């Protein structure tokens, strides 16, 4: 039996279609993690053990994720076998710039060579550079953590609150394990909100939820695994 990363392929296809089309110098960065918090019984030592990471064009995202679905028990984190229930897969919704990442990789490798450091991994340095080198900031990511167990009411309250400080048609909601990610499409922000939206959104935390201003960060992938018995999905 293999690990199951793709839970709902139709929802995954919908997510891939939603992502921005890429320019020739761009790709997406995808990472598969072992998350202790989703299944502590597995005995993992760390909450974010990185198992695999790749870059991908938009057209190959699903194929790349399928390649993560290897034989169950073959992933290890700090010497501990990773359970299906620990898995979560993430993507950068803002494209990465391979050209700028290449320049950063050259500099990083040169620095290692100049210091006579013979232990570095060029592939790891390149992937690190790609992860942090944003090409275009299409989205600003808000991570909404629920304090209340009434998820539906909390989502409704947050949607009502944020609609008072920014136009609702620039927002996309993705239900995640324990909360919601709200993606703000920056070019779709109306001029009436442009000046103050950031500081107003930052003030939205309340007794029902906390708002973390992630900005440019990784996002759980719709239609894929995110911990025990959960797969992220779009909220209308």
Image (cartoon, rainbow, N blue to C red):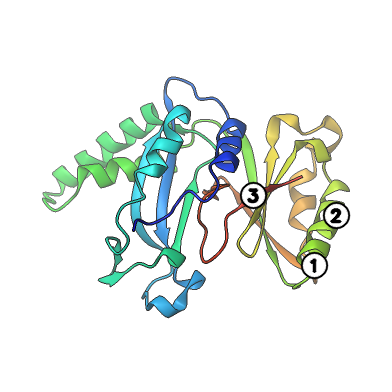
Residue under label 2: 161
In the figure, 174 relative to 104: above or below?
below
Q: Which of 96 and 111 is in front in this view?
A: 96
Q: Nearer the viewer, mark 3 or mark 1?
A: 3
Badge number at residue 206: 1
Can you identify the residue that label 3 sits on? 233
Q: In which quarter of the image is the C terminus?
A: top right
Which residue does the image show at 26% across and 42% down from the upper left? 108
Q: Where is residue 10 in the image (x, y as percent from the top left)?
A: 58, 39
Q: Quadrant of residue 216?
A: top right
How crowded pointer 1 is (Cα within 10 Å; few <14, some 14-19, many 20+) is rated as few
Residue sitting at the far top: 24
Label 1: which secondary element: loop
Tag nearer the camera, 2 or 3 = 3
Q: Is residue 91 left or right of residue 107?
A: right
CA distance for labels 3 and 1: 24 Å
- Please give the label number shown on residue 20: none
Number of residues whose C-alpha sits closer than 10 Å to that of mark 2, classed few (under 14), some (14–19) or many (20 or more): some
- Tell me if I can see residue 135 in this picture: yes
Taking the view exactly as shown, the residue that stands out farthest to the front is 1
């Amino acid at each position: 039996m293999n690990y199951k990363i793709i839970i709902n392929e139709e929802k995954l296809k919908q997510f891939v279609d939603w992502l921005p089309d890429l320019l020739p110098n761009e790709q997406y960065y995808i990472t598969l993690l072992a998350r202790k918090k989703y299944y502590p019984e597995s005995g993992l030592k760390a909450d974010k053990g990185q198992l695999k990471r790749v870059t991908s064009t938009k057209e190959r995202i699903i194929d790349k994720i399928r390649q993560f679905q290897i034989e169950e028990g073959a992933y290890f984190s700090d010497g501990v076998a990773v359970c299906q229930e620990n898995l979560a897969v993430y993507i950068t919704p803002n494209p990465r710039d391979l050209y700028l990442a290449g320049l950063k990789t050259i500099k990083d490798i040169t620095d290692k060579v100049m210091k006579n450091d013979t232990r570095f991994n060029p592939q790891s340095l390149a992937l690190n550079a790609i992860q942090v080198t944003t090409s275009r900031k299409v989205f600003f990511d808000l991570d909404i953590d629920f304090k209340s167990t009434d998820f539906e009411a909390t989502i409704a309250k947050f949607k009502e609150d944020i609609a008072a400080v920014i136009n609702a048609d620039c927002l996309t909601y993705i239900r995640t394990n324990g909360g919601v990610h709200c993606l703000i499409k920056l070019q779709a922000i109306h001029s009436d909100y442009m000046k103050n939206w950031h500081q107003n959104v930052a003030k939205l935390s309340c007794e029902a939820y906390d708002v973390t201003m992630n900005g440019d960060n990784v996002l759980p992938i719709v239609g894929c695994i995110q911990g025990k018995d959960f797969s992220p999905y779009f909220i209308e």
